[in-house]
Image (cartoon, grey):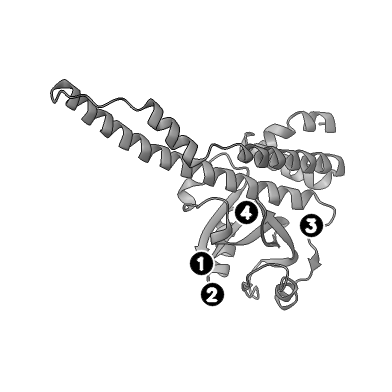
Amino acid sequence: MGCESWKAKLDTYLDGELPEEETRSFDAHVRSCPSCAADALSRIQMKRTIQAAGKSYAPSAEFRKRMQQKIAAKPRRSFGLGWTLAAAAAVILVAGTLTSAYLRTRSDSAQVFSEIADLHVAALASSSPVDVISTDRHTVKPWFQGKIPFAFNLPELQNTEFSLVGGRMTYLDQTPGAHLIYDIRKHHISVFVFQERSLPAKLADNSLLPKQLPFNLETWSQGGLRYFVVGDASAADIDRLAKLFKATS
C-alpha cells in the first residue's frame, strides 16, 4: 500500500473509525513513515484548533436561561387538564435536564479522551517525542520541577517489563501537565498527569470511555491529580502500568 493510499484513510484513522486490525497496521505505518507522521501531526493540530474555536462560541448559561424563559408556556388558571399538562411538562423538563446533563458529561469526557489520544499520536509522530531522555525516574521527575504547578511520583520499574523512555511538558486545552512515555515489547504507552481542578471538563470514570478510540486507555483521579494511561499495548499492559502509578501515592 503506497503512502497515497494510507493518507486517503488518515482522517478516518485519526477519528478512531477504522477496524481494529487496520488501526494496528496504521499505528505501525505512522511510526515508520516520516511523511505520514508529519501529515498526521498537521491534521491533529488542525483538529485541536477547530475544537478550541468551537468552544469560543458556546452559548453562556445566562443566554440559555433567557431563551428558556422566553419559550416557557404561560401558566393556566384552570386546575383541570391545564394542571395535568403542566405537571407532565415539569416531569419531562426534569427528565430532559438530567438526560442533557448526562449526555453533556459523556460528550465533554469523550472530547477530552479524544484529545488525549491525539496528544499520544502527536508525540509518536514527532521527531523528538520527549524533552528529557532518561530511563531513570530520579532524572525525569526533577526535570518537571518549576515547569508544571504540581508534583507527582513515578513508579519503580524493577522486575517489570516496562521501561521509561523520558518525558515532556504538554497541554490539554491550555492546562499544563506532564507527558511520560514508556515502552513494553515494542509498544509505546503515554502517561499524562494533570491537575484535576484545572481540566476543561469534569471527567467521569472509565465507563464513559468512547468505544471508538483507537487505543486502550485508563484514567483515574488520585491526590488531586488526573492520570491517563493510553497506548496500543494490550489492555492488560495498560492496567498493569496504571496499577504501578496508583501504588506510588
First in sequence, mark 1 or 4: give its number: 1
Report the residue marked by disc 2: 249
For mark 4, give the secondary structure: strand
- Residue occupying image coordinates x 67% and y 57%: 189
For mark 3, give the secondary structure: loop
For mark 2, give the secondary structure: loop
The reply to whether residue 2 is visible in this rendering is no
| CA gap, disc 1 and disc 4 | 17 Å
First in sequence, mark 3 or 1: give its number: 3
Look at label 3 and name its amino acid: Pro
Residue 19 x, y percent position in the rendering: 62, 34
| CA gap, disc 4 and disc 3 | 15 Å
Report the residue marked by disc 4: 230
First in sequence, mark 1 or 2: give its number: 1
Which residue is more in the foreground, 198 or 212? 198
Of labels 1 and 4, the one closer to you: 1
Mark identifier at residue 222: 1
Q: Residues within 10 Å of mark 2 (few under 14, many from 20)?
A: few
- Whether tag 4 and tag 2 are in contact, CB under 8 A, the answer is no
- Asked if residue 2 lies left or right of residue 229, the reply is right
- Asked if residue 89 lies left or right of residue 210, the reply is left
Of labels 3 and 1, the one closer to you: 1
- Whether tag 1 and tag 2 are in contact, CB under 8 A, the answer is yes
